Each structure stands twice: as C-alpha cells, then as structure tokens.
Image: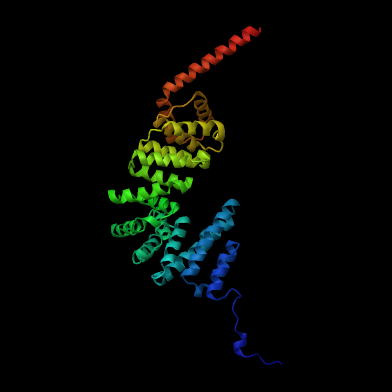
Amino acid sequence: SSQDPPAEELHWEPPSRQDHSQLTLSITGCDSTSSLLELLLHNQPRLNGIHLSAAFDRTIKLYRQEAQRPSWRTARMITGALLPLLTSELQTLMPDLANQPRVVTSIAHSLGCLDVRDRDLLGGLAALAQGCMPELSTQGLANILWAFARCEYQPSAGWMSAYVCACRARIAAFRPQELAMMIWALSKLKYKLSPDMQQDFLARARALFPVTSPQSLCMVMYALSMTGHHPGEEWLESFVEAALQPPGLRRFSPQGLSQLLWALSRIGHKPGPDLTAAIEEHFLKHSRMQGYKSIDVSTTLYAMARMQLPMSRNLLRLFLDQVEKHMFSFQPSQLANIGWALARLQMQLRQLRQWQQSAHQDTEQQQQQQQ
C-alpha cells in the first residue's frame, strides 16, 4: 500500500481539457472574461479556427456586457491579456483557415467589432477570403468588408474587384442588413462602382425597402451621401415612403434621424409635403427632442436649413430652445453649422421675432384691460 501507483495513473489534465465540440460549447458559455481567459489558456495547444471564432464572438458579448457596468480591471484584462492571446493564436492558426471561409469572415467581423487595427492580421484574412470569394455567403461578404472599413484597412484593387463581382453575382440573395453593410463599407473605403453595378445594388436596396430596418436605411442613405451619387427622384421617393411607414419617424433614434436628414440634405433632396409634415409631427407631438445630444441638434438643424424645409413657429422655437440648452456643449464645427443654419433661416427668424412681439403686445393689452 506504500508503493507509488503506476505512472499512467499520475497523469492529470485540467477539467477544461475537453473534446473539440465540447470546448466550443464551453467557450460560448463563459460568463466572465476571467473564466474565458482561463479556459483558453488551459486548452491553448488544442485550439482550432472554430474555437478561435467562438472565443472572439464571446469576447464581444462580454465586452458589451461590461460596457454597461464599467470595470477598469475587466477592461484591462480584455485589452491586456485576452485580445493579445486571441490575436497571437490567430496569427499562428492563419494557414489552417484556408478552407474555412465561414471562420475567416466571422473572425474578421469580430476584429471590426473590437476595433483591432492589425494590418498583418487583416491582410492575412483578406488573402484567405480572396482564395474562396465565390464560396462566401452574403453575410460573410457583408461582414468582411464592413470589418475592413471599420478598421480602415484598404484591400488591394484586385481584391476589391473580385469582391464586388462576387457580390453582384449574388445580389438577389442579399438581405437588408447585409446589403446596407456592404454599401456602407464600399463608400467608407471610397470604392467607385461602375454605373451598372451601382444600378444593380441600388435596385436591390429599393426592392428591400419595405422590410429594411431604420438603422439599415440610415446606412444606405449615409453611404450615398458620402459618394455624392444621386439615385434619382423615384428611388428617393421610395426611400422616404419606407422611412415613413408606421410608426413613422419614431422608429429612428435621435442619432439615426439626424444622420438621415443630413444625408438627404447632402444629396440635395427637396422634401415633399409628406416628409415635411412627418418631421413637424415627430418633433412637436412625439419626441420633443428628448434624448437629443448637442451633435444631434446641430446636425438636424443644419440639415433642415439646407433642405429649406419649412418650419412652423412652434418647431422653430423648439429648436432655438434646444440650441440654448446645449450652447456650452457644442463643438466649434457644430456652432458653425448652427450659425449657418440660422442665417439660412433668417426669414423665418424674422417672422418668429414678429410673432414674439405680437404676443408680447397682446399680453400687455390684456394686462391693461384687466387693470
């Protein structure tokens, strides 16, 4: 009984040493950054591309959870330990991902979400994607270019040519969010589409308008405004109709609506009576500009002035109250935009002063009559 047991019985592995599929499930089930880091370190020699993709995805979810309850310790663990481990493993495993297009695009999307601007890693993923471009799903096509645009990584001209050809070949399969991401990324990377491709992409976007989310609508319009391409009045009328479908502009966040109006103004759109009435109703009856930050106020006022959108007395007063409320929060460029907008609206401002003087006179007359 005092003798040592056989050597093989002394062999021990951490409980986290699991088979490949179980390890993937364990990674996706980690409920903290520390547990994910420990699990990866224990299984580091056995990690493959699928594990890495799951780990990146889980890191994003944990990062977003932590953003709601900020902790410098957790943030330091993510940036100082977890991300360096993941990126190092990605560099090591890169050659093994050659025949795994789904893993390649998923990891690229994760790098975009985490804002990892490592040109070597992004270049390696681009090279892998180019070798299997026809095999990429529409979601994969959208994700990888979105990631490159987000990280400001510019693929080669040859890569971009192969990319847009792959997108065009599958354009009918693109869903609203995928199409919006792809169009936004192309504009962000300043890629100029041929007229035929531009027409095909915009035709698909128009066909999807009825089922396109407010966020995706904003992405498409922002992309067009950045390229300076005017899609035509019929296309814009369809776009506005989609934006106004019930429950109307309430579907948009303050940032989303301000950017949407800014993009429409930049393209040179002249709002019709439906959009004009919807804007008036939205601000005066629904939002009252609750939750609007200084940049949203300045952007919206600038866009409305640029479109020469008629403003009622009450709407103009609402905006002037918001300008006064945020006066000491505006950046210099925002103040410049507000000044330009107010100068553009000077005729309406004169009318407002006349209304105010008239109201003041009416008040004085009522007070005199009461006396």
Quarter of the image holding residue 97?
bottom left
Name the outermost residue toward the right: 1
Measured from the top left, where is residue 329 in percent x and y?
Answer: 51, 35
Instruction: Please say if 184 is above or below 48.
Output: above
Quarter of the image holding residue 35?
bottom right
Measured from the top left, where is residue 298 in percent x and y?
Answer: 46, 34
Q: Can residue 326 be seen at all in this image of the molecule?
A: no
Residue at 33% of width from left, 40% of height from top? 232
Residue at 59% of width from left, 52% of height from top? 70
Report whether 306 appears left or right of 289.
left
320 or 134, nearer to the observer: 134
195 or 20, nearer to the observer: 195
Instruction: Please say if 338 is above or below 232.
Output: above
Instruction: Please say if 338 is above or below 54.
Output: above
Measured from the top left, where is residue 243 in percent x and y?
Answer: 46, 41
Residue at 42% of width from left, 21% of height from top? 347
Q: Quadrant of the N terminus?
A: bottom right
Report whether 350 appears left or right of 134.
right
Report whether 66 appears left or right of 230.
right
Measured from the top left, where is residue 259 in percent x and y?
Answer: 44, 40
62 or 367, nearer to the observer: 367
